[in-house]
Image (cartoon, helix red, strand yellow):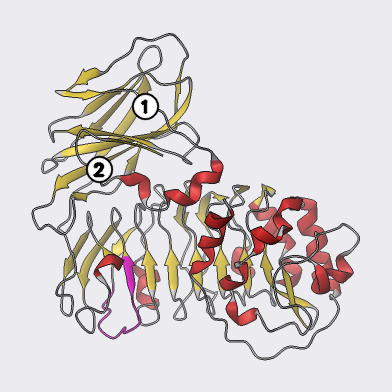
């Protein structure tokens, strides 16, 4: 498990900071830390050395700011011991006694996200990096995040962020924005950073219905990595013909469109580009890149209980589809099971032999690729509103035929600790007749 946690730190942000002098913890920083602990104290396992190995890679440029400490590891946070935080506390790095980096990943924190943002108000002008990755029980809207005016690295991956993200266009120094794997994030109040943005990860955000045209436009010359796969975002990609830095462009299953113009062919390795299921077409400088035609998304997805241990999923089909992927989760989106429904004329699937529980459901159309660039072309993913409660009862074994396709029983496995293996959405590129349990 620790290996998985460490792997998340593989993508780094270089912070352009001047040299700093070591000092005790300022009054403002102590006040902020006390407020954070009033929201929730990080679990003690979080400071285990194995958990922390490699976390410093998130913000390499901050590694030398403290003349005494050379890593993010340290002592657990102790109420009443805030004055020593800059010297000893895990995940607290300071400049002149002011907090510049808070690295609190996988800390099993609970509480309200807005309350945590409010706790950061005393250090809003000094914090450069905020890492809350994997704190899935930090929930709610991130109201106040827009006030962290010096922020360069933002890591909110796999939290329980929900609702509308505040307008972050005022964070002009933001270089890294990690918002992926937030199922309950539904919109953007404005932009995300500005012309300094290098990395934007918003993948696996199936309910993020937002137009990110302006976000991409203002960062078109600085962006190095874009991952919007399996997101509900829409918009037009800008002209990247002057951007020689862009080296990762994975937007499969999103609602983006436009023409991909790059300075030269081969700028992005074929393994690092995927536009399947979007409205993006190849342009100048893109020879050899696997650009596939768009496939319209399904609509009108619904799911209802259908007798004991079963539910009926229905949708409005796509004329050009060859079939559909129907995915369901019994643990609020952490793990998914996918049924492949062959035949574009299908509009429903009866999922049987389910354990009792509450299920989230989503549907994706697919089309067999004729270019050989990918196994399938897939549409954007559409989720059924709300969830379905399936009752417990003894059921028979075997499959049920729906629209000429047999669907059988399967169950999602694992727990919350397996989320890192789910970054590419639900293994949707499965061939007809196969099932994927994650």
- Tell me the quarter of the image containing the C terminus: top left
Residue position for label 2: 430
Towards the viewer: 21 or 317: 21
The reply to whether the C-beta atoms of the residues labelled 1 and 2 are less than 8 Å apart is no
Q: Determine which residue is flagged by label 1.
A: 410
Q: To which quarter of the image does residue 428 belong?
A: top left
Outermost residue on the right side: it is: 80
Q: Is residue 335 visible?
A: yes
Residue 167 part of the magenta-drawn span: no
- Few, some or many residues within 10 Å of mark 2 (<14, 14–19, 20+): some
Q: Nearer the viewer, residue 430 or 191?
A: 430
* Residue, far left: 370
Give the x, y percent position of residue 330.
47, 31
* Image side of residue 27 versus residue 282, left or right: right
- The residue lying furthest to the bottom in this view is 19
Q: Secondary structure at mark 2?
A: loop
Name the spot of residue 222 as percent of width and height, x first. 40, 81
User: Magenta residues: mostly which secondary structure?
Assistant: loop
Assess whether residue 248 is covered by the magenta stretch: yes
Q: Is residue 203 above or below residue 316?
A: below
Residue 143, numbered circle: none
Residue at 49 percent of width and 47 percent of height: 419
Q: Which residue is at the front of the view, 171 or 409?
A: 409
Residue beneath the point at 79% across and 66% down: 89
Image location (x, y in percent) of residue 110: 69, 46
Tell me: 321 left or right of 10: left
Q: Residues within 10 Å of mark 1 (few under 14, many from 20)?
A: some
Give the residues drawn in magenta, as a range.
Answer: 238-249
Q: Is residue 284 left or right of residue 169?
A: left
Q: Is residue 28 visible?
A: no
Q: Which quadrant holds residue 187?
A: bottom left
């Amino acid at each position: 498990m620790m290996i998985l946690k460490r792997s998340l730190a593989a993508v780094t942000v270089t912070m352009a900071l001047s040299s700093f002098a070591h000092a005790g913890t300022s009054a403002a920083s102590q006040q902020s830390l006390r407020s954070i602990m009033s929201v929730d104290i990080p679990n003690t396992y979080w400071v285990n050395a194995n958990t922390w190995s490699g976390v410093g890679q998130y913000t390499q440029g901050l590694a030398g700011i403290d003349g005494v400490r050379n890593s993010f590891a340290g002592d657990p946070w102790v109420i009443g011991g805030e004055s020593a935080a800059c010297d000893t506390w895990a995940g607290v790095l300071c400049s002149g006694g002011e907090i510049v980096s808070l690295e609190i990943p996988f800390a099993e924190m609970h509480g309200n996200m807005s309350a945590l943002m409010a706790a950061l108000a005393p250090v809003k002008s000094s914090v450069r990096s905020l890492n809350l990755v994997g704190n899935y029980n930090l929930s709610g809207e991130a109201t106040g995040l827009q006030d962290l005016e010096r922020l360069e690295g933002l890591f909110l991956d796999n939290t329980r962020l929900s609702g509308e993200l505040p307008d972050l266009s005022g964070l002009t120094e933001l270089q890294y924005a990690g918002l992926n794997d937030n199922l309950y994030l539904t919109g953007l109040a404005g932009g995300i950073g500005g012309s300094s943005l290098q990395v934007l990860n918003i993948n696996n955000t199936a309910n993020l219905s937002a137009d990110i045209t302006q976000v991409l436009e203002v960062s078109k010359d600085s962006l190095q990595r874009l991952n919007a796969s399996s997101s509900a975002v829409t918009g037009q990609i800008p002209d990247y013909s002057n951007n020689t830095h862009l080296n990762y462009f994975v937007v499969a299953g999103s609602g983006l469109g436009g023409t991909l113009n790059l300075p030269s062919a081969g700028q992005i390795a074929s393994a690092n580009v995927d536009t399947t299921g979007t409205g993006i077409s190849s342009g100048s400088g893109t020879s050899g890149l696997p650009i596939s035609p768009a496939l319209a998304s399904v609509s009108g997805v619904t799911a209802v209980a259908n007798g004991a241990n079963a539910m009926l999923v229905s949708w409005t089909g796509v004329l050009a589809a060859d079939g559909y992927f129907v995915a369901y989760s019994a643990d609020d989106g952490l793990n998914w099971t996918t049924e492949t429904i062959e035949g574009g004329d299908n509009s429903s699937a009866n999922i049987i032999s389910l354990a009792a529980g509450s299920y989230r459901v989503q549907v994706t159309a697919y089309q067999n690729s004729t270019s050989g660039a990918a196994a399938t072309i897939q549409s954007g993913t559409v989720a059924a509103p709300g969830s379905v409660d399936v009752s417990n009862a003894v059921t028979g074994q075997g499959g049920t035929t729906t629209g000429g396709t047999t669907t059988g029983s399967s169950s999602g496995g694992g727990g919350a600790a397996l989320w890192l293996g789910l970054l590419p959405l639900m293994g949707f590129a499965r061939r007809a007749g196969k099932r994927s349990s994650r």
